[in-house]
Image (cartoon, rainbow, N blue to C red):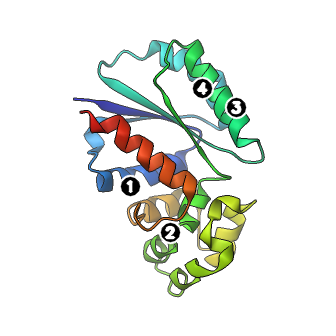
């Protein structure tokens, strides 16, 4: 039985995934999380952690925010680190621009998770149709929720409401697709 191992730059990503993965048919006992203290820490430790991983039948996902970097360059750097560790098969996914893009891609999940009405109706506005284009999605999410969104608790609350079929964030869709492919052969 495969174990999926996530290397994450922050705790909020783990909280989101813990809610989302059961919806993808992945039980939490088949998941391990290695959470770093930011993107620099992730990049500094990734090679060592991948090389030292000993649990058999593990598949790996590295997930990081794009932030202000070039998405292609960020992915190439992380892929290079994985190759340096001798792991050619690691799934590298970038949240464009931030994890909050995933939430803005499913405003119904924001509404349900935070218990705020009227947010889901804004999904059809051109601004929210492709949240990966937003330069600062965390700031936008703060405005949408009247300051109710908090990074870790909000991720915990909204993760279980995210619907891959409804989400309009391309980077979220690519993440979900990659996870399904990784786990499909188990």
Residue ID for mark 3: 40
Q: Which of marks 1 and 3 precedes in the sequence?
A: 1
Say whether disc 3 or disc 4 marks the residue closer to the N-terminus: 3
Where is 140 relative to 119, above or below? Answer: above
Residue mark closest to the camera, 3 vs 4: 4
Q: Residues within 10 Å of mark 1 (few under 14, many from 20)?
A: many
Q: Earlier in the sequence, mark 2 or mark 4?
A: 4
**Element on which disc 2 rests:** loop
Q: CA distance from mark 3 to mark 1?
A: 26 Å
Q: Secondary structure at mark 1?
A: helix
Asked if residue 154 lies left or right of residue 44, the reply is: left
Circle 4 residues within 10 Å: few <14, some 14–19, many ≥20: many
Q: Which comes sooner in the sequence, label 4 or label 1?
A: 1
Q: Residue at x 52, y 73 (%)?
A: 107
Q: Nearer the viewer, residue 157 or 91?
A: 91
Residue 72, quarter of picture: top right
Residue tagged by mark 4?
Answer: 79
Q: Is residue 26 or residue 176 the one in the foreground? A: 176
The dot on residue 20 is 1
Label 3 neighbourhood size at 10 Å, few (<14), some (14-19), many (20+)? Answer: few
Of badges 3 and 1, nearer the viewer stands 1
Residue 129's x, y, as percent?
61, 71
- Calculate the distance from the C-alpha at mark 4 to the C-alpha at mark 1: 24 Å
C-alpha gap between disc 2 and disc 4: 28 Å
Q: Secondary structure at mark 4?
A: helix
* Residue corresponding to mark 2: 106
């Amino acid at each position: 039985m495969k174990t999926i191992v996530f290397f994450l730059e922050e705790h909020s990503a783990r909280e989101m995934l813990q809610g989302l993965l059961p919806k993808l048919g992945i039980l939490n006992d088949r998941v391990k999380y290695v959470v770093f203290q930011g993107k620099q820490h992730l990049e500094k430790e990734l090679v060592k952690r991948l090389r030292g991983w000993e649990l058999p039948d593990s598949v790996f996902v590295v997930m990081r925010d794009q932030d202000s970097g070039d998405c292609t360059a960020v992915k190439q750097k992380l892929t290079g680190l994985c190759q340096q560790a001798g792991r050619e098969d690691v799934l590298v996914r970038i949240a464009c621009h931030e994890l909050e893009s995933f939430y803005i891609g499913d405003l119904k999940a924001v509404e349900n998770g935070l218990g705020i009405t009227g947010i889901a109706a804004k999904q059809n506005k051109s601004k929210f149709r492709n949240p990966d284009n937003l330069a600062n999605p965390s700031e936008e999410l703060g405005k949408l929720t009247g300051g109710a969104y908090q990074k870790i608790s909000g991720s915990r609350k909204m993760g279980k409401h995210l619907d891959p079929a409804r989400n309009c964030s391309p980077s979220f869709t690519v993440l979900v697709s990659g996870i399904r492919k990784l786990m499909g052969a188990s």
